[in-house]
Amino acid sequence: MTQKISAAITAVGGYVPEDILSNGDLEKMVDTNDEWIRTRTGISERRILKGTDKGTSDLCVPAILQLCEKRGIQPSEIDCIIVGTVTPDMLFPSTANLVCEKIGAVNAWGFDLLAACSGFLYSLTTGAALVESGRYKKVVVVGADKMSSIVDYSDRSTCIIFGDGAGAVLLEPNFEGYGIQDSILKSDGGGKTHLHMKAGGSLKPATIETVARKEHYIYQEGQPVYKFAVTRMADVSEELLKRNQLTGSDIAYLVPHQANKRIIDATASRIGLSEEKVMVNIQRYGNTTAGTIPLCLFDWEDKLKKGDLLVIAAFGGGFTWGASLVKWGF
Ligand code: UT7
């Protein structure tokens, strides 16, 4: 009888750049204030990747190298690297391609997965399927974004939210049932009205006019996105628990996308989790898009115990959203 393979998370790595952009710094750039930012979003500061020669791959590399060191493996042992990102170094080649070359992952293939703030969740589910198939033994899933490259620092409604950062996990086959248990992923392209980047794709390639009209920055209508995020992230987390015959009391931690502390609180309350069971680091990093969830796992790694059940939940541009149930494996 062939044993069922599950995809266990066996190592975590994380990286945020050194440079801090505080609420106080933003007060000098746009008409805002620390009090407004903290009460509306929960954010106090975010990290910014500086240097004209640095892209998202430079956030991925230290996160993956750290993960390899912790697990005691060489990059050449990695089979595949999936990078969830909306800020690839270039449209092509893929960031995963560039990362493989930078770290010496000479036996790996890889690809970028674009699902905005759900990028890590979509990539985790995809990476898990590769491992569960029995075909791949070491799959690295990264969530990374250099959001500062697409933020308009004269737009107070978006520049206060985003930051740069990356997190990575290693997925390996497990025969004792640890790892990714279940995922529900959803998508609604109608959400593009409220959250998108207007130009730079094949629909509207870059021109002098698109640059002059600031169409290469994030466009977000905060309130409708907020309303969708609050209900969808909570709905899908509840659906995931119900379908696995679980309640909040079975869950060690909620690992939510860090877009707004109020959205996180609403999701936690819907599935009956108290504050100490919710991973929150939005105050230090802001919204790093695909980076938020693996950066939470990275920050909480020491507190996690083998067998802990985690609910990972995300909502973002697309709209894309979903939730995964993970049994911590180390
Ligand atoms: O991760 C991807 C998915 N994205 C999200 O989940 C983000 C969801 N949306 C949000 O988190 C919130 O909508 C925001 C944090 C973006 C905005 O918070 P809000 O409570 O929805 O504020 P608002 O847009 O309704 O604006 C309220 C007021 C407005 O002034 P008036 O019209 O009431 O006079 C804004 O002009 O606050 C004003 N405002 C600001 N004031 C000070 C907007 N941005 C700022 C600012 N500082 N930075």
Image: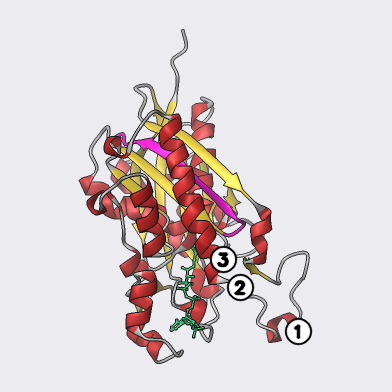
Residue 193 location in percent, x, y? Answer: 67, 65
Q: Which residues are magenta?
A: 317-330
Q: Is residue 136 above or below residue 232?
A: above
- Amino acid at dot 1: Glu
Number of marks present in the image shown:
3
Seen at 31% across and 58% down, the residue is 280
SS of the residue at dot 1? helix
Of the image marks 2 and 3, the number of the one nearer the N terminus: 2
- Amino acid at dot 2: Tyr
What crowding class fits label 2: few (fewer than 14 Cα within 10 Å), some (14-19), or many (20 or more)?
many
The CA span between labels 1 and 3 is 28 Å
Circle 3 is placed at which residue position? Answer: 224
Between 140 and 150, the residue placed more toward the observer is 150
The CA span between labels 2 and 1 is 17 Å
Circle 2 is placed at which residue position? Answer: 219
| Residue 329 covered by magenta stretch | yes
Between 98 and 31, the residue placed more toward the observer is 31
Circle 1 is placed at which residue position? Answer: 209
Q: Viewed as shown, does residue 305 lie left or right of 216?
A: left
